[in-house]
Image: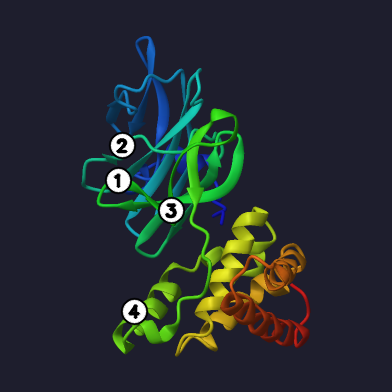
């Protein structure tokens, strides 16, 4: 779920105004250490007591008046990489999160309406993906649980594996409407457009989990058309469509999958095949 940012022309950079300066974060030298600079504001030791050898701004992601900057700190030891997020907004002081992460050195960030999320492997050695979301100035772990020590003793997290689909009858109409509204707001814009789908990478485990979630949600009242419509660009894409249908087939044939999940996936797969067959691959 990558958001491609177009760099500004050099002339524009020279004529930077305060409104655009708040969207920039740079690494600077501060004595024997590195620090971060947001305009004229210097953020010393952004990782606090956690010592890091190198700082790197992974990317900057505008979301309305706020820009989120993902920063990686690298160090030797069992946990080679950690991250912080700096939120900048014109007219206010920068806000910086506490260090977070799984010790993995790679991460993918997504800014959307009203939110910012970061996805990364569950451990430094890889594994399924986990997500962190910006909430009240902190990056909170979502859709995952601490997993202690993974294979090889690597610290990290393990994703929750849904054993079945949550029945829509388990929620009242207001809750059902809230779930659908949350989907409409949080489903990444990058997955709704062919142009961005061509450019992003989706890990197999992440794709499988997403397909299962889409299939389950498509059975909820009001979501029967909204979810397949939102998912059509993904399944129609030349880059990710075959893998998405393969994930459908794997879940449907997996003897460890709950019978309700397999049924939902089969129905969702048939709907997506019908929709994709009616249009040219993107």
Q: Nearer the viewer, residue 89 or 257?
A: 257
Q: CA distance from mark 2 to mark 4?
A: 30 Å
Residue drawn 32% across the image and 81% down it: 175
Quadrant for residue 254, please give it: bottom right
Query: Badge 1, how many Cα within 10 Å: few under 14, some, many 20+?
Result: some
Q: CA distance from mark 1 to mark 2?
A: 6 Å
In the image, residue 121 above or below residue 159: above
Q: CA distance from mark 3 to mark 4?
A: 20 Å
Residue drawn 33% across the image and 28% down it: 46
Q: Nearer the viewer, residue 93 or 247?
A: 247
Horizontal and vertical percent position of residue 117: 43, 53
Q: Is residue 156 visible?
A: yes
What color scheme is it? rainbow
Residue located farthest toward the left when viewing the structure as drawn: 92
Q: Nearer the viewer, residue 246 or 64?
A: 246
The mark found on residue 98 in the picture is: 2
Q: CA distance from mark 1 to mark 3?
A: 11 Å
* Residue pointed to by mark 3: 117
Q: Is residue 121 left or right of residue 27?
A: right
* Residue pointed to by mark 1: 138
Task: Classify the position of the N terminus by image quarter.
Answer: bottom right
């Amino acid at each position: 779920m990558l958001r491609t940012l177009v760099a500004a022309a050099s002339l524009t950079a020279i004529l930077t105004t305060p409104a655009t300066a708040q969207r920039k974060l740079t690494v600077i030298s501060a004595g024997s250490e590195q620090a971060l600079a947001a305009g004229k504001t210097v953020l010393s030791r952004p990782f606090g007591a956690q010592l890091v050898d190198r700082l790197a701004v992974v990317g900057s992601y505008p979301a309305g008046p706020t820009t989120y900057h993902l920063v990686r700190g690298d160090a030797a030891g069992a946990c080679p990489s950690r991250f912080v997020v700096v939120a900048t907004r014109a007219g206010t002081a920068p806000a910086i999160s506490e260090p977070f992460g799984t010790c993995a050195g790679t991460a993918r960030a997504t800014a959307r309406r009203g939110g910012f999320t970061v996805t990364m492997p569950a451990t430094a050695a890889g594994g399924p993906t986990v997500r962190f979301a910006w909430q009240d100035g902190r990056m909170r772990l979502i859709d995952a649980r601490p997993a202690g020590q993974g294979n090889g003793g690597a610290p990290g997290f393990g994703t929750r594996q849904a054993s079945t689909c949550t029945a829509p009858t388990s929620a009242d109409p207001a809750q059902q409407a809230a779930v659908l509204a949350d989907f409409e707001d949080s489903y990444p814009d990058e997955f709704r457009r062919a142009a961005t789908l061509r450019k992003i990478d989706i890990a197999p485990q992440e794709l499988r989990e997403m397909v299962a979630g889409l299939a389950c949600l498509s059975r909820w009242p009001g979501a029967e058309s909204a979810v397949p419509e939102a998912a059509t660009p993904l399944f129609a894409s030349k880059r990710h469509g075959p893998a998405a249908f393969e994930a459908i087939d794997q879940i449907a044939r997996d003897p460890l999958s709950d019978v309700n999940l397999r049924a939902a996936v089969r129905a969702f797969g048939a709907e997506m095949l019908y929709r994709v067959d009616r249009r040219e691959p993107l």
